[in-house]
Amino acid sequence: MQTGKVDTTAVIYPCAKLGKGVVVEPLCIIGLADRFHDELPCVIGQNSFIGSRSTIYCGVVSGDNLDISDQTTIFYDNQFGNNCRIGPKAVIKNGCRFGDNIRLNALVFLERVDMGSNIFVGPGTVFTDDFHPPCPKYLDCAKKTRVESYVSVGANVTIAPGITIGHHSQIYAGAVVIEDVEPYSVVAGNPARRIKDFRKLVCKPGHYSRPFEWWDE
């Protein structure tokens, strides 16, 4: 195990494997066993940062440059690509899959969500996963939520179970998304509705020829 710096107050369980250059701040717990599942390795990629008082369960696998802010909890069976950033006090429950270049801000909640790459999720956004909680059969009822690549989700958005958000889309802050979002959509409201074509967005200050053009670089 090659590490950058692991604080002496951190608890690192034997199933945890930390890549070269990983920094672990005080009072973190990494590789904690999940009481409902078999113990699996917890793998943190190179040059990652784990903020203080964060907890990462076994069965979590990340690529390089994972950046986790303070007091975040990542439960069993979650996978991350490279260059993923997670804000403070986020909660990532079981069964999520993330591509590369993911930004999850503070207080985001997710469970059973599959994400592509190049995705921004604003603070306070909630991905629900149960139509009638706490139904004991929800795993057989609600399919996983899917977010395709190149999507920006604003702050305090609520997304219903089993939704698919198409690529190159923007969800405005405060929206309540209860049905699938087509690619190249801008949606807003409660319930959320398509209000314009993503390709017609304008950068009002003129810094870019159009918003999100950096995704094409």
Image (cartoon, grey):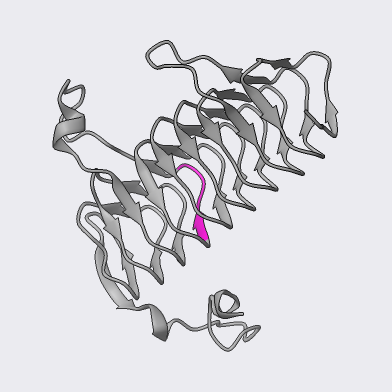
Bounds of the magenta segment: 119-124
Q: Position of residue 171 (x, y in %)?
A: 38, 62
In this rendering, the answer to whether 102 lies above or below 10 is: below
Residue 121 inside the magenta-drawn segment? yes
**Left or right, residue 103 beside residue 144:** right
Residue visible at 68% across and 47% down in the picture: 64
**Left or right, residue 84 beside residue 114:** right
**Left or right, residue 47 beside residue 121:** right
In this rendering, the answer to whether 121 lies above or below 62 is: below
In this rendering, the answer to whether 182 lies above or below 10 is: below
Residue visible at 52% across and 14% down in the picture: 33
Q: Could you tell me which quadrant the C terminus lies in?
A: bottom right
Residue visible at 79% across and 13% down in the picture: 9
Q: Could you tell me which quadrant the N terminus lies in?
A: top right
Q: Nearer the viewer, residue 144 or 60?
A: 60
Residue 151 inside the magenta-drawn segment? no
Q: Position of residue 80 (x, y in %)?
A: 54, 45
Residue visible at 15% across and 25% down in the picture: 137
Q: Position of residue 168 (x, y in %)?
A: 41, 72
